Image: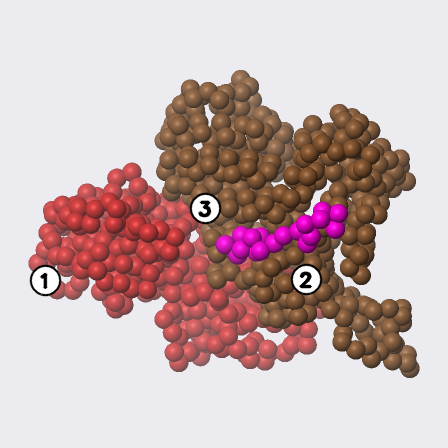
Chain colours: A brown, B red
Amino acid sequence: MVQLLENPLRVGLQQERTPEPLILVIFGASGDLTARKLVPAIYHLKQRRRLPPEISIVGVARREWSHDYFREQMREGIEKFSDGIGAEALWDDFAKGLYYCAADIDDINGYKKLDALLTEIDKERGTRGNRVFYLAVAPKFFPEAISKLGEAGMIKDPNKTRLVIEKPFGRDLSSSQELNQVVQRACDERQVYRIDHYLGKETVQNLLVLRFANAIFEPLWNRQFIDHIQITVAETVGVEDRAGYYESAGALRDMLQNHLMQLFCLTAMEPPNVMDADSLRNEKVKVIQATHLSDRDLNLSCVRAQYGAGFMRGIAAPGYRQEPNVNPLSTVPTYVAMKFFVDNWRWQGVPFYLRTGKRMPKKVSEIAIQFRNVPLTLFQSAAKQVSPNVLVLRIQPNEGIALKFEAKMPGTELRSRSVEMDFGYGKAFGVEGSDAYDRLLLDCMLGDQTLFTRGDEVEAAWKVVTPALSVWDSPSDPNLIPQYGAGTWGPIESDLLINRDGRQWRRP
Amino acid sequence: MTQSTSVLSLQAPKDVSISQVEQELSKIWQSYGENAAARASTFNLIVYEPETIGKPRMASIDAIASQSPCRVIDLYPIHGEDEGITAQVAAYCPIQKSRSSLVCGEYITLQGASEAFNRVHTLLADLVIPDLPVFLWWRDSPALNTKMFERLISLSDRLIFDSAVFSNPEEDLLKMHDMIASGVQIADLNWRRLAPWQELTAQAFDAPDRRPAVLEIDRITIDYERGNSTQALMFLGWIASRLGWQPLTSVKEGGDYNIQRITFKGHDEMKVEAELAAIPIGDPGEVVGDLIGLKLLSSNENLNTCTILCSESMGCMRMEASGGAQDLHTNQVTPLTDQSADALLAQQLQRWGQEVLYEESLAVTAQILQLEVATK
């Protein structure tokens, strides 16, 4: 592969703010996320000179590690999962700011010990009492950790302390409400950063830019011109080693309620008054509140399914129920498709089809906006079919935007053919976008909540899928769960969901 | 209470003696009570505003207060006899739509003859809130070797200048470089004005097919508004530091455009020529010395290097007139945000710590300025 030269004029060039000196405290520091994602992301920001020199990280976990051992582990993580250490001097400088504190998440004494360490670091490194507490622990520990941080008085200052919570935010409406209550007792909503890393992706943010920085799309972005919208997030992987978690979650909780709902919100919401956290999140909440499954009869508005045995790129792949640690009679869906309507002036009558699944033929995430057909066909299509305009926003891979439209075929006859105008991120900018965690961690350190989910938004998203959840969570006959072969685009029931409306799923 | 667009003043500024400053501020807070207006400070900002600035005083309150609550100590030396220092205190509160109560900062103004300030400069330390960082915004040329300046620097964590107001730009830039070398943390608001130019210059070479051309640039022309050369020199220092150019010679040709030519040793021993031209402008606006045009060329005609950036106000005519317009990559530099010192200060107050890119660029600018200058 040819390596692209770096643009030397980009080095060190920054338009953005740098955060104030602070300590990032990571609970669950001995876990995978810390070494694989969080610390490499912070180091990457440091390499790009986006952080102040005082920045410090304190890892917290049960294991009895020393500061030096923690530093070694983090170095290994950066070397293994990121672009490497680079200049040794930079690493040495970064490593000086890494600390470790062994503590039990449910023991208040551990928090007191941590607080003392943080005060000491404030003095040593000039971090001025600014803290970000990152809960990279299993969701069952969220309430305990948040309560104890509150009890220890460590998140009482809303201007200096922040709390980051990884998804999932609850497992249904009532548990998300309970978690939000715990959060509200311990701190202010403005201190809380609920991470859905999908929102950190460049192309997801570009959706906002596409809609609200261009004058040509917004006039068409409504029921007058749009026939329907399809949002697809397809994975090629199966459940892999996550069966323990996945058996209690499934595709609806793992993907649709959060990632796909975020894509849906950004596609369907009204323009915010200003691009700040509350304005944007208010619009997201408004559109979710106007959203509902297209029909109370779940058979007509949603489909769940599991992958059965099949082939992935010619290699035999087991079915979900044959995967290690999966209940052979499991009814947990690995595929979900839903049809929503939005009851507002912009979208009345426009269906939104959302689908996500594992073991699909391609790894692809995209939003396809299909426009209405021309009112009268004047030109004969070479393919002898109606070819509506489609605007496709590719989230991954090949991040970009494509517009399908009709053009005249060369020749003496007036025949049309579909062609694509294609914008590719890589081609236009020559650089890959930053990692989602880089962006989100930086935003959190800067105190910008725009790309984080607010408590009421989480609850509203759970509400939308509650009719399906309440039925699917109750015991059902495993034989009634539709199956699709690994390496296919989902079950026949899913095709019926959309074909019934005279439409069909795109083949991305 | 008086109200501006985004800042509320709790009461009209009140005259007090220096020794009563703290006491008077406490009275303001007591009269409002915690629920109506909370006193808060996240940093100290000392502003040195010589009378020569001529702008309305307190003009920056919006910019400062709307960012973060802080204690501002505004020093206002005036011409005239030493009649001591007069002090005023006030409290200002940024209005935030998300809050019902006000979070307010304090504003202390000290006015007197320069001699009076020299006498009382030691008292300033008592007016600073301890344990909070101190920014010093020095709205003048660096006054090295003066008691006041030295004392204020020793009080501050970070020094902010606007080199657009420097009276001897080249000499003053060298002073800034020397201060950085001696460990003073410096920010220059005028450096921030270069951001759109830097961004568009970098953008011109983002596309993969143009990427190799950036290393082949061997001619650069920079036009700037006559009156202050700091932006032009810092931009040249920036691009030279990014592309690894080493300054070799400097010639001042003078003429209508006060042309200065600098040569560098570039990539692979390549000779690089730079031309700085001071263009006379009828009305340069609030800031003197803004960049108005930039042209990058390569003598390697096989590469698609030619890039022109020009300010919206002046257009691209002079840059395009010298030929080679066929394959030009042309762009107009239109800053979206206001480039006034107030707006830039508001951004600067959110930045902490060392600015490596600025320091590296200024180091090369200093090398250029230290070259023996020939004249034609």
In front here: B193 or A280? A280
Which residue occupies the extreme top position in the image?
A64
Q: Quadrant of residue A374?
A: bottom right
Q: CA distance from mark 1 to mark 2?
A: 78 Å
Is the Cβ of the residue at disc 1 closer than 8 Å to that at disc 2?
Answer: no
In front here: B350 or B124? B350
Location of mark 1 (residue): B81
The amino acid type, in three-letter code, at marker 2 is Val
The amino acid type, in three-letter code, at marker 1 is Glu
Q: Are marks 3 and 2 on the same chain?
A: yes
Q: Are marks 1 and 2 on the same chain?
A: no
Horizontal relation, residue B166 to residue A266: left or right: left
Location of mark 2 (residue): A350
Comparing labels 1 and 2, the label whose residue is closer to the camera: 2
The amino acid type, in three-letter code, at marker 3 is Gly
| Residue A504 placement (x, y as % from top left) | 80, 57
In front here: B333 or B216? B333
Horizontal relation, residue A138 to residue B5: left or right: right
Image: magenta residue range: A282-300
- Residue at 12 percent across and 64 percent down: it is B80
Which class describes the residues within 10 Å of circle 1: few (<14), some (14-19), or many (20+)? few
Location of mark 3 (residue): A447
Identify the image quadrant of the N terminus of chain B. Answer: bottom left
